[in-house]
Amino acid sequence: MENYFTENFEVQAKNSSEEALQRWRKLCWLVKNKKRRFRFTANLSKRFEAEAIRRSNQEKLRVAVLVSKAALQFIQGLSLSSDYIVPQDVKEAGFQICAEELGSIVEGHDVKKLKIHDGVEGIAEKLGTTITKGISTSEIDRRQRVYGVNRFTETPPKGFWFFVWEAVQDTTLMILGICAFVSLLVGIVTEGWPKGAHDGLGIVASILLVVFVTATSDYKQSLQFRDLDKEKKKIVMQVTRNGLRQKLSIYDLLPGDIVHLSIGDQVPADGLFMSGYSLLINESSLTGESEPVNVNASNPFLLSGTKVQNGSCKMLVTTVGMRTQWGKLMATLSEGGDDETPLQVKLNGVATVIGKIGLFFAVVTFSVLVQGLFTRKLEEGTQWIWSGDEAVEMLEFFAIAVTIVVVAVPEGLPLAVTLSLAFAMKKMMNDKALVRHLAACETMGSATTICSDKTGTLTTNHMTVVKTCICGEIKEVSGSEKFGSSIPESVRKILLESIFNNTGGDVVVNEAQKVEILGTPTETALLELGLLLGGDFEEERVKSKIVKVEPFNSTKKRMGVVLELPEGGFRAHCKGASEIALAACDKFLNSNGDVVPLDEASTTHLQDTIEKFASEALRTLCLAYSDIGSEFSESGDIPFQGYTCIAIVGIKDPVRPGVKESVAVCRSAGIVVRMVTGDNLTTAKAIARECGILTDDGLAIEGPEFREKSDAELQQLIPNLQVMARSSPMDKHTLVKQLRTTFQEVVAVTGDGTNDAPALHEADIGLAMGIAGTEVAKESADVIILDDNFSTIVTVGKWGRSVYVNIQKFVQFQLTVNVVALVVNFTSACLTGLYDPIALPGNAPLTAVQLLWVNMIMDTLGALALATEPPTDDLMKRAPVGRKGNFISNVMWRNITGQSLYQFVVIWYLQTQGKEAFRLDGPDSDLILNTLIFNSFVFCQVFNEISSREMEKVNVFDGILKNYVFVAVLSCTAIFQIIIIEFLGTFASTTPLTWQQWFVSIAFGFLGMPIAAILKMVPVGSS
């Protein structure tokens, strides 16, 4: 059976093949309600549609680029005239260009039209904006009226009645509805109103109850997913508006806004390049084309949804929302849905197999019941004479058979997965973890190893420069004037030039008229040092012209900039990993501020300084410069040799509180934590020891050494590897791939940069940082850690385990009810005559109405109760499931088998000995006995639900009162059962019971708990 599920109902947690997604769908032909069953699965037809749009975009852009290149050559030197007429409503709003014209320029890469409108500056003027001030907030309403808003059309939220209508479309409920209608007609004709209507109305009432409870559960679930979806779409950008640089949601952007883009950002709308450096754009998300595109003044077109692969720029927004190709693509993609999770698919398989067995039992049960009726009529000699009562009886047999299918097809199994995931995702959101893909939530529960970044994840990411080595002297950085005054003026000048020009950060005045530093924590720390030295950011920037920028990336581990100096000539500035930048230096500034050759003694002194800073867990950077003469081509690379060392800085980034404890929790949970960082090996080891990651027998290695190892050597090395320093993104990718494939580990990986995307994509669970992470990293991730805190990753792991275990509990509970309900009705219908010589075969103790109530207890209510259990600390004291674990474990089979046997024995005893045991005789004896059986059966489920809270522990009451949903479901089930027995007998085919009969029914149910406890002591092999 396990092989059958593996072959047909197994999909990957990420990037499943289309063949696998199609295969399991085809096998699930026995489905009661397709719309409900497959609601949380991918809409493959919509995905094909989105792919077709991508291919169309690719062709359009290819043609547009070719045309624009030809047009550019043709129009050089030509004076062009425009036949464009500004629409009246646009003129009245105060603008000189309409949305359609802007869209055709950018989307069509129309160089000719752009030149007609006087280039990017002309477009900015016609949009009423400037590069320095942006638009004014006072004109937002006008702009929205003319140009629209930056939102794509989404499917409108579904209301409660939609889910009612969806629940009604259950095939089995519709058949039961027809049975109820016929029963009503026949009953009223033969017995009159209201007596003849009781059976039919009972089924109708049960159907309505099932429909409304199901719809309420589904509606609440949809609200949870809608809230999570809103959180996923919260993206903010740096925008200049009202003359101030500020953070704005991408949905608030309008044509005329000036957006600041840097590496890893997603282009939020269509626009035009205004100024920037080394801008490379990846358009694969829009066109499928993987080759990056150079965007500059001669090719200024930026398309919404594309990604900044390298460089930075200021962009003029021209077109927003559904007027962009990305808007149209997203409107289609949003209907494509998330891939189904492995558990969803596996449980769809379980539901299908059990459903087929149930269908067989239902057909046999109906055949036996009908055969019993025919046998009786043959004996009476009335086989050709049929009364209304007998027609109703035949209809009841059919209703019982259909209801067996209702109970037998455990449609609640795959739906319980989404219920549990929705609950967990909502709670995880409160714990600062945003789950982007459903499957990640359950996969995290199986994680066996976490590869974590250092900066910002294990540390606070609040960086400050605490030590410097300037002119060969180590200095403590303090706020006093003494620190800056001891530095020679010539050195101070070159240091400020380096800090304020060779940066990806910015110093601005915010709305409160206070100086604010923008940028990464490292950039911020250096800019703070520059301000402390008395520097003026704007003043330094206007002194010299920036000719070329090579932004920092984690492969080169450095950033470079070339300045054109006012007195003529060019100067390159470099900053980066200390030992890498220092290796490019052959000179340094001495204590007098003079440039002197870097001899062996000086080199040793600087290297010792780097080692000293690193051993104090400081992040070290080296700042250097080089005068490169009067010849420099912007298209060439920045030279990386012959530099003069200006300073070495030591940046403090304290370890986050609680990290050491979280690492210890991971270790007790069988999860190995590895640190993968770009920092110096000594710094990495110091931090790793402080966090409790690096142990005495653990191994720390540098990336260059790691990538030189052969596969055989890696197999020996990786099990003990705890720290990898000076790693490149491909080192991280290689480590993850080895762990997943060679060692069969379930790997979680953290990442924040654009270059981390391959590792995040390769990992079983990609965890992107919400604060420090780029949009590219977030899009490649499965979970976004909103507070960038390692402790939150441990919380995600705990919730993942909770989801996995909760679904196991629910499956155990539902399969027990399935087995017992099937066997009881089947054996009762087929074998009544064997133990009661007077009776003929054909008596089912549980009626259609009763089975519908049982189905609701085990399906919707059972899922609510068991699939929403909050996690406990004990979950992190057991070994992870890993990649190979069976979902339905030996422990579950033991509990299901033992509990089913007990319940069947109870029902069998009541059927065979019930009349004698309770001294039942008279015309109502069968009705009382069947009520007793029904009541005992329901209370067996109530107490089995409590026992299912723990699959291995005897104490099932621990924390029960903290789970309000569980208590509410259990209370409602018990109260409604009393109402059904005592007050709704006419409709539910029950009769009020005496207190002794109530006591025995509840006692039979309660006895299941000690039996469950005894079962848990029976040892079983590993799963």
Image: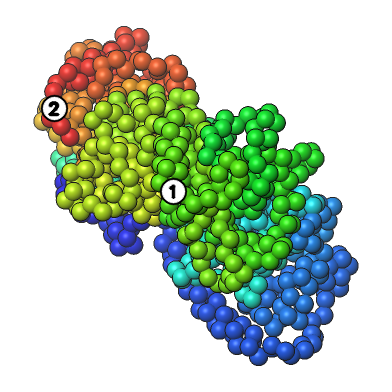
Residue 757 in view (yes/no): no
**Which image quadrant for residue 550?**
bottom right
Instruction: Please name the residue shown 56% across and 54% down the image.
Output: 625
Give the camera-side residue of 99 and 727.
727
Secondary structure, mark 2, is loop
Please name which of the two marks, 2 or 1, marks the residue nearer to the observer.
Answer: 1
Task: Check whether the beta carbons of the residues at disc 2 and disc 1 lie within 8 A of each other.
Answer: no
Give the camera-side residue of 934 and 121.
121
Residue 91 in view (yes/no): yes
Q: Which residue type does callout 1 highlight?
A: Asp
Secondary structure, mark 1, is loop
Q: Is residue 542 above or below residue 282?
A: above
Q: Which residue is mark 1?
A: 599
Q: Which percent across, then down, holds residue 223?
A: 55, 41
At label 2, counting other C-alpha atoms closer than 10 Å, the crowd grade (few under 14, some 14-19, many 20 or more) is few
Q: Is residue 133 left or right of residue 992?
A: right
Q: Is residue 163 above or below residue 271?
A: above
Instruction: Please name the residue shown 16% across and 37% down the image.
Output: 830
Q: Which residue is mark 2?
A: 1020
Q: Is residue 869 above or below residue 320?
A: above
